[in-house]
C-alpha cells in the first residue's frame, strides 16, 4: 500500500514499445528464473541476492542479468499475479454490503497474503519506482482502501482518527512479526493483527500520537527497497 498514491498513480503500467518475442530457449530461461525467484523470495524475502536466484534456477549470473537487468524488474515479474490478487481483494471488500466486515476482511486477507509469502510481505512495505506496473496496481489498491475507510467511518464502525497510514504501519509490523517468528510459530501473526483490528473499532478508547507524515513514510518504504533491490547489492552478495 503506497501512502504516496499521487507519486505512483500516474505510471499506468510499463512504457515503451513491445519487446520482440524471445527465442524458445531464452523464454525457458526466463520462466526458470521466475520460478526459482518465487521459491527463493518466498523462503528468504527480498534480501535474497540475484546470485542465489541464479543458483536456484541453474543459470549463470550473466544469463540472469540478460533476462532481468535489475532486481526490481525480477520482483515485478515474480509478484505481478500477487499484486493482481491484492487489487482483487480490495474489489471484493468493497462489494461486501457490511462496511466493517469488508474493511476488517480486507486487512485479514492482506495480512494472510503476507504470511503466505515472505517475499510478498516485503513487496507490500516497499516502494519500487522502477517496477511501474506493480506500482500502478499498488496505487489502484490504495484508492480502493481509501473508499473502504470512508465507508467504515460513515457507518460509525471505524474510529475517526484512523488513516491509511495506519494500514502501512500495520503491514510493516506484520512483516516484522513474520520475519521474527518464521516457521517456528507460523500463525503467531494472527494475534497481533486481531488486536490491531479491535483497536480500530469505534468508539476510540483514547487519543493516539500523530501518524508519520506521508513523505516520511514514503521515504521509509523507499529506503527499504533501495537496500533490497539494487542490482549492485545483488551482484555483491
Image (spheres, rainbow, N blue to C red):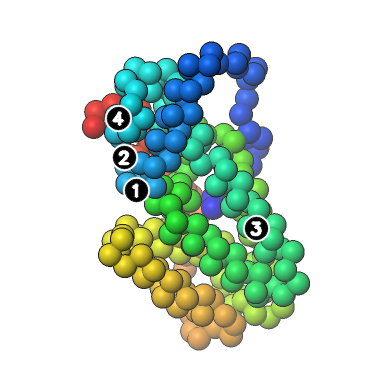
Label 3 – label 2 distance at C-alpha: 29 Å
- Residue 208 appears in the rendering: no
Q: Are marks 4 and 3 in contact (CB under 8 Å)?
A: no
Q: Earlier in the sequence, mark 1 or mark 2?
A: 1
What residue appears at the point 61 percent right and 14 percent down from the top-left corner?
A: 20
Q: Which residue is mark 1?
A: 43
Question: Tag 4: Cα neighbours inside 10 Å, few (<14), some, or many (≥20)?
Answer: some
When asked about the image quadrant of residue 233, the answer is top left
Q: Earlier in the sequence, mark 3 or mark 2?
A: 2
* Relative to 51, residue 113 above or below: below
Q: Earlier in the sequence, mark 1 or mark 4?
A: 1
Q: Which residue is mark 2?
A: 48
Question: Tag 2: Cα neighbours inside 10 Å, few (<14), some, or many (≥20)?
Answer: many
Label 1 – label 4 distance at C-alpha: 15 Å
Q: Earlier in the sequence, mark 3 or mark 1?
A: 1
Q: Are marks 3 and 1 in contact (CB under 8 Å)?
A: no
- Residue 111 appears in the rendering: yes
Q: Earlier in the sequence, mark 4 or mark 3?
A: 4
Amino acid at each position: 500500500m503506497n501512502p504516496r498514491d499521487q507519486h505512483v498513480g500516474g505510471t499506468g503500467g510499463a512504457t515503451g514499445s513491445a519487446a520482440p518475442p524471445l527465442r524458445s530457449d531464452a523464454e525457458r530461461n526466463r520462466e526458470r528464473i521466475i520460478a526459482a525467484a518465487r521459491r527463493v523470495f518466498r523462503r528468504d524475502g527480498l534480501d535474497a541476492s540475484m546470485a542465489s536466484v541464479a543458483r536456484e534456477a541453474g543459470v549463470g549470473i550473466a544469463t540472469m542479468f540478460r533476462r532481468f537487468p535489475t532486481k526490481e524488474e525480477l520482483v515485478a515479474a515474480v509478484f505481478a499475479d500477487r499484486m493482481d490478487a491484492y487489487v482483487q481483494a480490495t474489489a471484493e471488500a468493497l462489494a461486501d454490503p457490511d462496511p466493517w466486515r469488508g474493511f476488517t476482511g480486507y486487512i485479514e486477507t492482506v495480512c494472510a497474503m503476507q504470511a503466505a509469502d515472505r517475499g510478498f510481505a516485503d513487496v507490500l512495505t516497499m516502494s519500487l519506482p522502477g517496477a511501474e506496473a506493480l506500482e500502478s496496481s499498488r496505487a489502484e489498491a490504495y484508492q480502493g482502501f481509501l473508499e473502504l475507510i470512508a465507508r467504515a467511518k460513515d457507518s460509525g464502525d471505524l474510529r475517526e482518527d484512523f488513516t491509511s497510514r495506519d494500514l502501512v504501519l500495520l503491514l510493516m509490523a506484520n512483516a516484522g512479526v513474520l520475519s521474527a517468528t518464521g516457521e517456528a510459530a507460523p500463525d503467531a501473526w494472527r494475534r497481533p493483527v486481531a488486536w490491531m483490528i479491535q483497536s480500530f473499532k469505534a468508539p476510540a478508547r483514547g487519543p493516539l500520537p500523530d501518524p508519520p507524515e506521508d513523505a516520511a513514510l514514503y521515504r521509509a518504504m523507499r529506503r527499504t527497497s533501495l537496500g533490497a533491490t539494487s542490482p549492485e547489492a545483488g551482484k555483491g552478495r
